[in-house]
Image (cartoon, grey):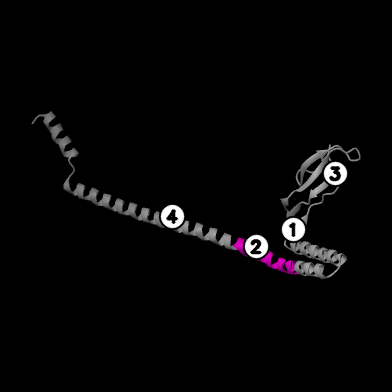
Amino acid sequence: MTESKHKKDRAAEAAAPAPKQTVAVTDELGAVEAERDQYLDHLQRLQAEFDNYRKRVRRDAEELRLRAAEGVVESLLPVIDNMQRALEAAAKHEEGQLIAGVELVADQLHTVLSSHGLEELPAEPGMSFDPNVHEAVLTQPAPEFASGSVLSVLEKGYLLHGALLRPAKVIVAQ
């Protein structure tokens, strides 16, 4: 045999795997596919568990929000009862008693809301305008006040647990 023919025969042997090598590769491929399927199954289960967890957290947060509102509303029920009593008293009595009753109810409402973390923002005529806690609704010339000071308060502002709930709406001097 010539040397070129030997090279061709050796190349053909190398290109054609032996039957044992084919079986081994097929077995290894099957094992790798099984492992891939296990990882895919595991990943799909984790994804489903995470979706369920996310839904549960969302549901729990909504329930907590509703429960928190329940406490505030429950604490306001006596205020509603006293307002009804004040209105009944107004139908039977003179005007002075109605004013006193409404003042008592307003004080009670303020106390209940304060117990839930509500604080009134300081805002009064003559104070410096603070854009962090005041909302300028209007500006007017006012020679008796310094420019940039509060002329009057249209709506009070409030903090809830230290965070701005609503800015005070004010008229500011030019």
Q: Give the overall secondary structure of the magenta segment.
A: helix
Residue 9: horizontal and vertical position, in percent?
A: 13, 35
Q: Residues within 10 Å of mark 2 (few under 14, many from 20)?
A: few
Q: Secondary structure at mark 2?
A: helix
Mark 4 vs 2: CB contact within 8 A: no
For the N terminus, the quadrant is: top left
For the C terminus, the quadrant is: top right
Mark 3 vs 1: CB contact within 8 A: no
**Which numbered marker is on residue 69?**
2
Distance Cα–Cα, label 4 vs label 2: 33 Å
Distance Cα–Cα, label 4 vs label 1: 42 Å
Instruction: Identify which amino acid the numbered label 3 is placed on.
Output: Leu
Residue under label 3: 151
Distance Cα–Cα, label 2 vs label 1: 14 Å
Q: Is residue 89 left or right of residue 69?
A: right
Label 2 or label 1, whichever comes before in sequence order = 2
Q: Secondary structure at mark 1?
A: strand
Residue under label 1: 118
Residue 131: horizontal and vertical position, in percent?
A: 76, 43
